[in-house]
Amino acid sequence: MKYKIEYNSDKKYVTANIEGDIELEPLKQFISDTADFLKRHDCHRVLHDFRSASVNMTIIEIDEVPKLVTHFGINDSFKRALVISDDFKKYNFFESTSRSKRQNVKIFTSYSEAKQWLLGDAEFSSQAIPISIANESK
């Protein structure tokens, strides 16, 4: 699983992208790194792009993810949009489980719709200060 996390200083949101197989152990590090990045930039909005990823987790493991998110300090004051290409059943389960734990998360298949929901009525800009971290693990 490879991931990259960047901060858009213009619109004040974080993009967090994953490529490859999403498995629980590497996902824990991704969540931790994302939470640290959000805290460092005092940011409460995340646009996750998982279109190049596939979920390789059981329903029981997926049920643990919202608890991990909360454990790392991402609570109901954060707004998170996830852009996906498939695995609708697993992602819908994740969204339902997250919302039951009072997390503000929504699943999209359109990147532009996810960004619009995340930013509300704010105008879009592609300008960002190139602040990022990347991780690659097998």
Image (cartoon, rainbow, N blue to C red):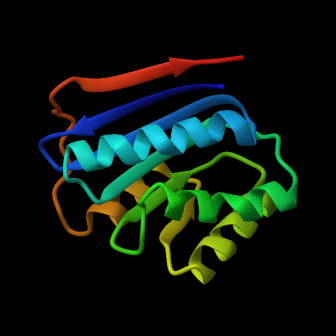
Q: Is residue 51 above or below residue 86?
A: above
Q: Residue reaching furthest front? A: 71
Q: Quadrant of the N terminus?
A: top right
Q: Could you tell me which residue is drawn at 52 percent across and 60 percent down?
A: 71
Q: Could you tell me which residue is drawn at 66 percent across and 58 percent down?
A: 65
Q: Nearer the viewer, residue 115 or 132?
A: 132
Q: Is residue 103 above or below residue 114?
A: below
- Where residue 104 appears, as percent x and y from the top left, is 45, 73
Q: Quadrant of the C terminus?
A: top right
- Where residue 87 appears, as percent x and y from the top left, is 78, 51
The image quarter containing residue 9 is: top left
- Where residue 70 appears, as percent x and y from the top left, is 51, 64
Q: Could you tell me which residue is drawn at 72 percent across and 61 percent down?
A: 64
Q: Is residue 12 above or below residue 67?
A: above
- Where residue 79 appears, as percent x and y from the top left, is 38, 66
Q: Nearer the viewer, residue 14 or 121?
A: 14
Q: Left or right: where does residue 51 sit relative to residue 81?
A: right
Q: Nearer the viewer, residue 53 or 124?
A: 53
